[in-house]
Amino acid sequence: MSDACKLAAGNWKMNGLRADLDEARALAEAFPKPGCGVLLCPPATLICAMADVLEGSAVMVGGQDCHVRESGAHTGDVSAQMLADAGARQVILGHSERRSDHGESSALVAAKAQAAHAAGLVAIICIGETEAERDAGQTLNVVLAQLADSLPEGTTAANTVVAYEPVWAIGTGRTPTLGQITEVHDALRAALRDKAISLLYGGSVKPGNASEIFGIENVDGALVGGASLKAQDFGAIIAALEQA
């Protein structure tokens, strides 16, 4: 564990209805004073309602994406200002599902991060290699290039978190070896040099493997997908991070 702040961030993706807010409430009740940052990023339809449910608790609310513009003729999009107005404090950007499903480039991710910073949001910038890139021995080249191209000017530890998510491990149940995670996180820490930016690992993080992942020196937390949907599962991951 480095000197950066520890964070357990849950990405609900396109999951969750108002009835599922009970899980957020249960999580807040279980961790009134967590020993790390705790964040839930529900779909945009639930941000305002979740912020109301979690008001006064230690659990933060975030968004899953934002547009580069403050407002305008962009049907279906949500601006960073709108997220902040709804109660979000952070926003996930550049997730591999956005990069692949919507063709988002690192340059676009950097522009979105700049918009997030301007709205007072912390940007969680995701990077990661595909299975083909891993097999070709290009992992470090890919992730370091994404890192350099996705961070806007003015990036600091106060406004940015970086999440390494190997694309081939997201939602597949496959997890890189501890050595593979160590190699990438060490390279990211070296590239960031004097910036104490928190480095999260994401990709099939579960209660059963969280402790060993958090034992890696430059892993400061996790960006959790499916396991964040249930308070009991996400709570076990948070507890493992508190003890790391």
Image (cartoon, rainbow, N blue to C red):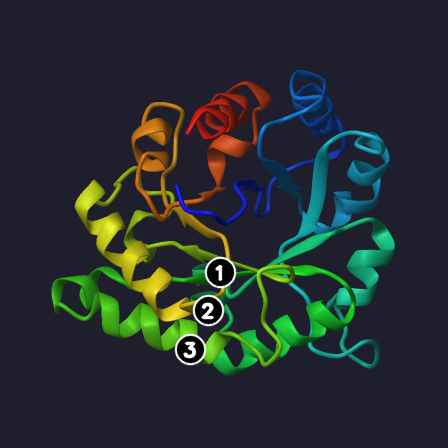
User: Label 2 is placed on what type of residue?
Assistant: Arg
Q: State how far apart marks 2 and 3 are (Cα).
A: 16 Å
Q: Which label lies toward us, 1 or 3?
A: 3
Q: Quadrant of the C terminus?
A: top left
Confirm whether residue 128 shows in the render. no
Question: Relative to 18, is 131 above or below?
Answer: below
Q: Which residue appears at 49% of the width and 53% of the height?
A: 198
Quadrant position of residue 149: bottom left
| Residue of label 2 | 99
Question: In terms of sequence position, does the residue under pointer 2 or pointer 3 come before the other?
Answer: 2
Q: Which mark is residue 148?
A: 3
Q: Nearer the viewer, residue 194 or 185?
A: 194
Say what secondary structure mark 3 lies in.
Answer: helix
| Residue of label 1 | 95
Q: Nearer the viewer, residue 187 or 17?
A: 187
Q: Is residue 157 left or right of residue 48?
A: left
Q: Quadrant of the N terminus?
A: top left
Q: Which mark is residue 52?
A: none
Question: Relative to 70, is 178 above or below?
Answer: above
Say what secondary structure mark 1 lies in.
Answer: loop
Say what secondary structure mark 2 lies in.
Answer: helix
